[in-house]
Image (cartoon, coloured by chain):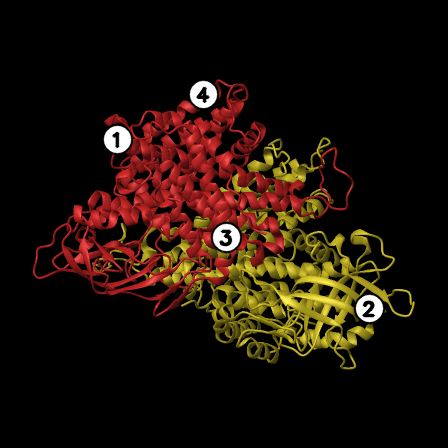
Chain colours: A red, B yellow
Amino acid sequence: MWTYQAPVADIAHLMLRVLDAPASWARMPGFDALDADTARGVLEAAGQFASDVLAPTNAPGDLAGCTWSPGGVRTPPGFAQAYRAFVDGGWPALACAPEAGGQGLPQALNAVLYEMLTSANHAWMMYPGLLHGAYEVLLHHGTPELRERYLEPVATGRWLATMNLTEPQAGSDLGLVRTRADTVGGAAAANGGAVRVTGQKIFISGGEHDLTDNIVHLVLCRLADAPPGTRGLSLAIVPKLLPDGRRNAVHCDGIEKKMGIKGSATCQMRFDAAEGWLVGEPNRGLAAMFLMMNSARLQVAMQGVGHLEAATQNAHRYAHERVQMRAARRPADAPPSAADPIAWHPAMRRTLHMLRARTDGCRLVAYRVALLLDEAGHHPDAAQRASAGAAVAFLTPVAKAFFTDLGHRSADEALQVWGGYGFVHDYGIEQAVRDSRIAPIYEGTNEIQAVDLVMRKLLPDGGRAAAALRDALAADADACAALPQGAPFARALRGQLDAWAAADAALLAPAGGDAEWPLRAADDYLAGVGHALLAWAWARIAAFALQPQAAAEPGTRPAAQWLDAARFGVQWLLPQAAVHWARIGQRDAALPEVAAP
Amino acid sequence: MWTYQAPVADIAHLMLRVLDAPASWARMPGFDALDADTARGVLEAAGQFASDVLAPTNAPGDLAGCTWSPGGVRTPPGFAQAYRAFVDGGWPALACAPEAGGQGLPQALNAVLYEMLTSANHAWMMYPGLLHGAYEVLLHHGTPELRERYLEPVATGRWLATMNLTEPQAGSDLGLVRTRADTVGGAAAANGGAVRVTGQKIFISGGEHDLTDNIVHLVLCRLADAPPGTRGLSLAIVPKLLPDGRRNAVHCDGIEKKMGIKGSATCQMRFDAAEGWLVGEPNRGLAAMFLMMNSARLQVAMQGVGHLEAATQNAHRYAHERVQMRAARRPADAPPSAADPIAWHPAMRRTLHMLRARTDGCRLVAYRVALLLDEAGHHPDAAQRASAGAAVAFLTPVAKAFFTDLGHRSADEALQVWGGYGFVHDYGIEQAVRDSRIAPIYEGTNEIQAVDLVMRKLLPDGGRAAAALRDALAADADACAALPQGAPFARALRGQLDAWAAADAALLAPAGGDAEWPLRAADDYLAGVGHALLAWAWARIAAFALQPQAAAEPGTRPAAQWLDAARFGVQWLLPQAAVHWARIGQRDAALPEVAAP
């Protein structure tokens, strides 16, 4: 009943036409040979894997879940076969360097791949989901020996990787991590040095499974003489199987019974003086891990887009199949009937447009961030790399939090389209609601993203990165304003940029001894910026659709439908932004202490 | 980990002090002996049952779910024992007439009972949940013979009852119901006449179970010569066991695998020329059923309040237990520590205040509706009964849709307080999110409620009921304005009432040939009115807390905490209303047709 057909034409339209990614790639050494046809071929092949191979494992995977025994974890039926096909297709290495066995393609294409994998099967996606981050950590922080041993198997997905951060007492607050790393034989701690790792980790996705022989754990831990807090954390690589083939002292003691992504094994891990090696400098583990987390956060943002897409296409299909009651407004050529497709009723039309507008908007913003990520790493001009990097740093927490929030909420709102059937497992949407609920939590809760945005990305540079970003977005308002029918989109975008600038000024103004003030405004600030980005996306999409000479991607929706969604976004969804911006203005609103119960 | 302690003092504070229910009861024959102490005693006993007997069955019931076999349905462990205790305590008959074996207490106390039952175990509550509606249908439409046979067992809960409406093709659109009722031996159809019922029903809560021997099904069906659509529907009573002890031809062919309320058996029912009797006049079944549905809808509104309460008290407790990171603002007397309770962090404070403000506000509105329901049935003055009835008719769809929406969304938002633990079954909140998701769907989806509100409650009387309601609410704005510190609450309430009046004017203005216009605005209108009602509730709660001479209920929160929540509601939550009112203003916003995929 629940299906997923990768919307390759829509995706290609946004990335290759509206954003003209090939023009960016042409400027970057390494990607300059990547033309639109090649990119389109990659998107089509990715779509085929997601739609034909992976999507059919989604509902059965939820029903079967994972099974733990002392001997290991069994993933749901079909997961291992799908993973083999994924590795055989070379997908894990899509955006890895050719030197490491990768295909050297841009992150932007990898981002689309992960959007599609999430739409198709979020739980399964969790297994390869950490590969690229682990690859980056090894590439940038691993010693030559470690890189020699682990880079290729991780890049190609022959061995899967994990990220061991959380402990029962240390979730958002990694400074409380206790897992110990002891150097061997009295040696001083050093990058690549051997350690024995001891401690407990929880919520470890793919900590144990039956998809690959070896599993490469990256473990946040603390050396014996380390300072307390986050400045005393180190990172160790601890493989399940040691280089000589022995089983390492890494144990999975159980898996969680969760709300969703039941096919993903969420493991309780125990390290009993397990053998490992430091990756990166002692006590600098968090910095190394953050490299992995930033890459992971953009990927989580793509999960929001993936859930939006899956809910959108299924709701549209179902709303056209299901008939109930005659509609007050019927197409002129509709035959008489006792009941019409519910897609004709206004409440459902509104939900369907809402889903489409959010999907289009979030997708375009996400692809722009992904293209900036490539620019930050590969642009020939250093200044351009730096400014792209600053933009990515600013946009990543917004995309992670805002898109995952919308991804989950939209699936939840879409469920109403199915009425009572929506609550029943067979129709798929209830699984989507459950699966999508994890994304606002993991890789830093959405509340933590908001704090990161305000305290680390906005305030320290006096708002310069934000202002530069607004200037870049404002160019599209000008382009839009010059087009017939473009004025409402330009006006909406400019209104959002002005409100955003005013919020920056309010947050950057002296706090008058109120140390907590910017923190209180953080969630609204993030949501406000998120809406401003959507206003930009709808303007950009509309501008393309309004240009008679612009060639749309073959097979994508007609320009009028792109415009309908963008216009709905501006008229029906954007007003919500005012609530967030206004709350930042009401700086003195009480947020008193909460009495203990 | 998840606990429920019925907040009896808070409930009594709102019902007995802030709303002064005993003063209303004193005016009504039948309730005039009900003083505050007696009411308090009932609330305490209900709270004890919900907290001590029922709440412990909630998490195990979700894990075990119901088990179907051709022989019947097994409910989760503990459900049957809890049900026996419920019947032995006389709870089903709380608001039934003494003549029918009932206790003759007001609906308002029954409403609180069902709020508590939902907080404690939503799935279990489903079984007795339809008793009172079935009782009302039998009382008002049953022939003396049927009342003699079924009224007492249903009133006392000795036999449970169901409501058989939905069929695969007939959900929101009951006009499509096909289940057939054939009169027996060529007799003309008449109230109380014997029929044979044949057809399939789905989504029948408690269609089969092991809690009572007999089950009394009320079945929407169609006589052979009935006109098509909703004017050709009749209602039949079809018991599982016939008066002579034979098993009737009513079969449960299976139960649904659902997102939540897994302990509630959602049955696929098959009637094979099952023996039954008409209840009410032929072809007037929907009117009789609506009596049941209106009672049911207020009860569903209480479910929203019940979920709000459960999420609120658990989130408050957990946020004070869990420590992560030092807070930017710490109480002056807090000892130094590496990490503080997360309840001290602004994002969590905001969530906790949000939960409390919504719970207080929705609860007060719901209790007012319940008191009006009693007034509509029992006030000695006919004009007063009529105006209370009109107010209830207007408020019921708002309370059903707005509170269930807030109940579910608030549980979903509260889940963030638990971070990763929130996604794990053991902590309870993920179950609350899943369980609460059904309430916006059943008893008429929230979208259907909005259509009902605008098309049946607002437009037909030219907005008179709405205007009368606003006048009554405005009195509290005046009372508030007269108190020191009361002005902001009065201002907020008046602002909402003005916006509501403007929306009525817009909806009542000639539509200029746009037959669909009010339908497009219906969802925003309902949400706007919901916010106006919250503004009233916060003003009323604040007014009470601001009166130095007003005696608060012993054991309830200090006045300052009631004020904190009300103030947070006005400052942080009420701005959302502007979005809904503004959308009604933008009458020409495009809501174009949605192209078929």
Q: Picture coordinates of residue A528 (x, y %)? A: 41, 37
C-alpha gap between disc 2 and disc 3: 42 Å
Name the residue located 49 percent from the left edge and 61 percent from the top edge.
B432
- The disc at residue A386 is 1
Query: Are discs 2 and 4 both within one chain?
Result: no
C-alpha gap between disc 1 and disc 4: 26 Å
Residue type (three-letter) at the residue carrying disc 4: Ala
Query: Are discs 3 and 4 both within one chain?
Result: yes
Q: Picture coordinates of residue B374 (x, y %)? A: 66, 63
Which residue position is annotated with label 2?
B196
B353 or A302: nearer the eye? A302
Which residue position is annotated with label 3?
A433
* Quarter of the figure that contains the N terminus of chain B: bottom left
Which chain is home to disc 4?
A
- The disc at residue A479 is 4
Q: Dot 4: what SS?
A: helix
Query: Are discs 3 and 1 both within one chain?
Result: yes
Name the residue located 34 percent from the left edge and 69 percent from the top edge.
A71
B275 or B376: nearer the eye? B275
Which chain is home to disc 1?
A
First in sequence: mark 3 or mark 1?
1
Which chain is home to disc 3?
A
C-alpha gap between disc 3 and disc 4: 38 Å
Q: Picture coordinates of residue B259 (x, y %)? A: 54, 60
Residue type (three-letter) at the residue carrying disc 2: Arg
Dots 1, 4 in contact, CB < 8 A: no
